[in-house]
Image (cartoon, rainbow, N blue to C red):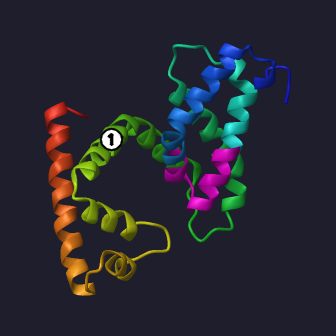
């Protein structure tokens, strides 16, 4: 790391750095994932972005928009990594990547509001239904695994998941409307 590394920060600035990175990892990852061909590439770029954030945090002005600053760093990491993605089946020219980046950046607050509403609504589900839904979307699991863990038949699991999805959709929509979310 250079002279602006996080190691040369005073303890309060180090705490601020850790707090901001921890609080906004999901948003930065979501931004990256919108720009690259797969989840693993986004995870790799997130790690690279985090290193640069740590190296350059001394230049970040407290009180300004950390997510915008971090996403700008992420955007440049993506631009630098484009050659690596050129071998991928799906490639975009730079204008498309820039347009996606602008759209992803403008949607951060909406996606955060939706995520918070979904967390709230998941918390309101019956524990058996919540567990089944979380199992269904756990990496490597499917409906069959969710059915088995919940003690339901496959057909009953499909019906239950459809019902739960509708409940969650209605709950999230209602909550966002009440809060006047973007």
Q: Is residue 156 left or right of residue 86?
A: left
The answer to whether residue 79 is visible is no
Q: Can residue 153 be seen in this view?
A: yes
- In the rendered image, the quadrant that contains the N terminus is top right
Q: Is residue 170 magenta?
A: no
Residue 73 x/y as whole percent: 63, 34
Query: Quick one: 77 or 20, which is closer to the camera?
Result: 20
Segment colored magenta: 31-47
At a point 57% along the width and 54% down the height, the residue shown is 93
Q: Residue drawn at (54%, 25%), measured in percent from left and top? A: 66
102 vs 158: above or below: above
> For the residue labelled by badge 1, is the local secondary structure a helix, a strand or a loop?
helix
Q: Observer-nearest residue: 149 or 137?
A: 149
Q: How many marks?
A: 1
Residue depicted at x 66% and y 14%: 12
Q: In this view, does 172 lie to the left or right of 25?
A: left
Residue 6 x/y as whole percent: 75, 24
State left or right for residue 52 relative to residue 30.
right
Specify the quadrant of the image occupied by residue 105.
Answer: top left
> In the image, what residue occupies the spot 16% across and 58% down?
167
Magenta segment's dominant SS is helix
The image quarter containing residue 3 is top right
Q: Which of 67 and 118 is in front in this view?
A: 118
Asked whether 34 falls inside the magenta stretch, the response is yes
Coordinates of residue 98 in the picture (x, y in percent): 52, 43
Q: In this view, does 25 lie above or below 162?
A: above
Quadrant containing the C terminus in the rendered view? top left
Residue 154 position in % (x across, y down): 27, 85
In the rendered view, tell whether residue 40 sits above or below residue 177.
Answer: below
Which residue is label 1 attached to? 116
């Amino acid at each position: 790391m250079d002279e602006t590394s996080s190691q040369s920060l005073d303890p309060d600035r180090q705490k601020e750095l850790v707090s901001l990175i921890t609080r906004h990892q999901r948003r930065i990852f979501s931004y990256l994932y919108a720009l690259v061909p797969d989840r693993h590439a986004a995870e790799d770029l997130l790690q690279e972005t985090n290193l640069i954030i740590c190296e350059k945090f001394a230049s970040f002005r407290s009180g300004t928009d950390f997510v915008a600053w971090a996403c700008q760093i992420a955007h440049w990491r993506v631009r630098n990594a484009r050659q690596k993605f050129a071998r991928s089946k799906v490639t975009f020219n730079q204008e498309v990547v820039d347009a996606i980046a602008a759209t992803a950046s403008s949607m951060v607050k909406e996606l955060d509001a939706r995520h918070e509403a979904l967390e709230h609504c998941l918390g309101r589900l019956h524990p058996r239904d919540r567990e089944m839904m979380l199992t269904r979307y756990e990496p490597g699991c499917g409906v069959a695994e969710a059915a088995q863990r919940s003690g339901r038949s496959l057909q009953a699991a499909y019906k239950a998941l459809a019902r739960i999805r509708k409940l969650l959709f209605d709950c999230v929509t209602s909550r966002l409307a009440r809060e006047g979310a973007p």
